[in-house]
């Protein structure tokens, strides 16, 4: 009978400090939303996403992963990518939609919490190439850049007969609910974790440089497009996988 190696329960300073930076960015986004600085609130969520990416990469590169770090990271993610985006969209435009507005924000928040809880229970057993469900940072990115881009900018134009703006707010609420439901779905999303161990080619590095140039020129447009395409990629990958399995089953039956 072999003894099981106990999980590392220590606290590593560097990843935890980076996680704290991300938590602060999420907290600052909440403060900015309360103060009505919605663009700053959206950008703060993007900053939190950067710190969230760095703490995971640093933990893997320095071999400082721990149970404490995983739990702390999830709690920080719930604030930065769950509560902060939900409060941002509600205060930005959903507060005028009545019950539907706060329900849309709550559905997103609840789904973010469920997604993070499920992720923690699957650590070590899930396929590292894919995420099960839309990652909470990506969902928060869709919402934050959607507001930063002001995709429903026509919400500011009113008519004497009907407030055209509410059409845009309802559209935003539907997108928010879709993001929440995709987080708790079984739709697969590419994780990009395999890129950590691969050598980058010259063309890949050139593509990154060009992408950064375009990003700096129109960050809100580029980021929203990227996050929205990633949101759509999950159903596309899942459908392709289902079709492949069906073809393989047919081949097995015919042989």
Image (cartoon, rainbow, N blue to C red):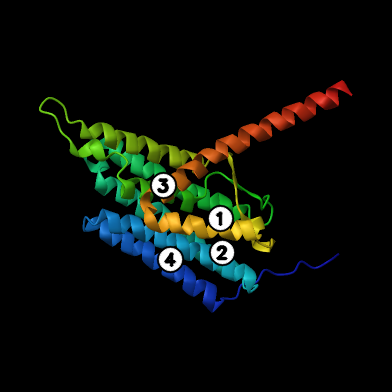
Q: CA distance from mark 1 to mark 2?
A: 32 Å
Query: Percent x, y for residue 239?
Result: 62, 32
User: With 165 as the anchor, is 72 left or right in this view?
Assistant: right
Q: Earlier in the sequence, mark 4 or mark 3?
A: 4
Question: Going by the picture, which residue comes out furthest to the top?
Answer: 254
Q: Which circle, 3 or 2, is nearer the viewer?
A: 3
Q: Which circle, 4 or 3, is nearer the viewer?
A: 3
Residue 79 showing in the rendered view: no
User: Of helix, strand and loop, which one carries label 4?
Assistant: helix
Q: CA distance from mark 1 to mark 3?
A: 18 Å
User: Of helix, strand and loop, which one carries label 3?
Assistant: helix
User: Of helix, strand and loop, which one carries label 2?
Assistant: helix
Q: Earlier in the sequence, mark 1 or mark 2?
A: 2
Q: Earlier in the sequence, mark 3 or mark 2?
A: 2
Which quarter of the figure is the C terminus placed in?
top right
Query: Percent x, y for residue 156?
Result: 19, 39
Query: What's the residue at 47%, 59% (across, down)?
Result: 212
Q: CA distance from mark 4 to mark 3?
A: 20 Å
Q: Which circle, 1 or 2, is nearer the viewer?
A: 1
Query: Mark 2 packing: few (<14 Cα in 10 Å), some, or many (20+)?
Result: some
Question: Mark 4 highlights which residue?
Answer: 22
Question: Mark 3 highlights which residue?
Answer: 224
Q: Nearer the viewer, residue 70 or 32?
A: 32
User: Of helix, strand and loop, which one carries label 1?
Assistant: helix
Q: Is residue 7 above or below residue 32?
A: below
Query: Mark 3 packing: few (<14 Cα in 10 Å), some, or many (20+)?
Result: many
Give me the disc on residue 207.
1
Q: Which circle, 1 or 3, is nearer the viewer?
A: 1
Question: Mark 2 highlights which residue?
Answer: 70
User: With 218 as the anchor, is 74 left or right in this view?
Assistant: right
């Amino acid at each position: 009978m072999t003894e099981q190696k106990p999980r590392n329960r220590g606290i590593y300073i560097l990843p935890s400090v980076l996680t704290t930076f991300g938590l602060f960015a999420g907290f600052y986004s909440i403060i900015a939303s309360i103060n009505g600085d919605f663009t700053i609130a959206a950008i703060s969520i993007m900053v939190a996403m950067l710190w969230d990416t760095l703490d995971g990469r640093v933990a893997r590169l320095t071999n400082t992963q721990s149970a404490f770090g995983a739990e702390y990271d999830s709690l920080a993610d719930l604030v930065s990518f769950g509560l902060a985006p939900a409060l941002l969209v509600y205060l930005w435009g959903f507060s005028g939609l009545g019950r539907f507005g706060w329900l849309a924000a709550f559905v997103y928040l609840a789904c973010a919490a469920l997604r993070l809880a499920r992720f923690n229970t699957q650590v070590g057993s899930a396929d590292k190439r894919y995420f099960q469900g839309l990652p909470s940072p990506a969902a928060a990115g869709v919402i934050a850049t959607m507001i930063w881009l002001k995709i429903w900018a026509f919400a500011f134009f009113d008519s004497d007969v009907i407030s055209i703006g509410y059409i845009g707010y309802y559209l935003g609420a539907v997108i928010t609910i879709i993001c929440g439901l995709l987080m708790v779905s079984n739709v697969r999303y590419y994780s990009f974790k395999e890129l950590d161990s691969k050598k980058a080619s010259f063309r890949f590095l050139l593509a990154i440089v060009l992408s950064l140039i375009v990003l700096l020129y129109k960050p809100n447009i580029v980021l929203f497009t990227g996050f929205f395409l990633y949101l759509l990629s999950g159903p596309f990958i899942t459908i392709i996988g289902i079709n492949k399995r069906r073809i393989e089953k047919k081949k097995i039956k015919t042989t």
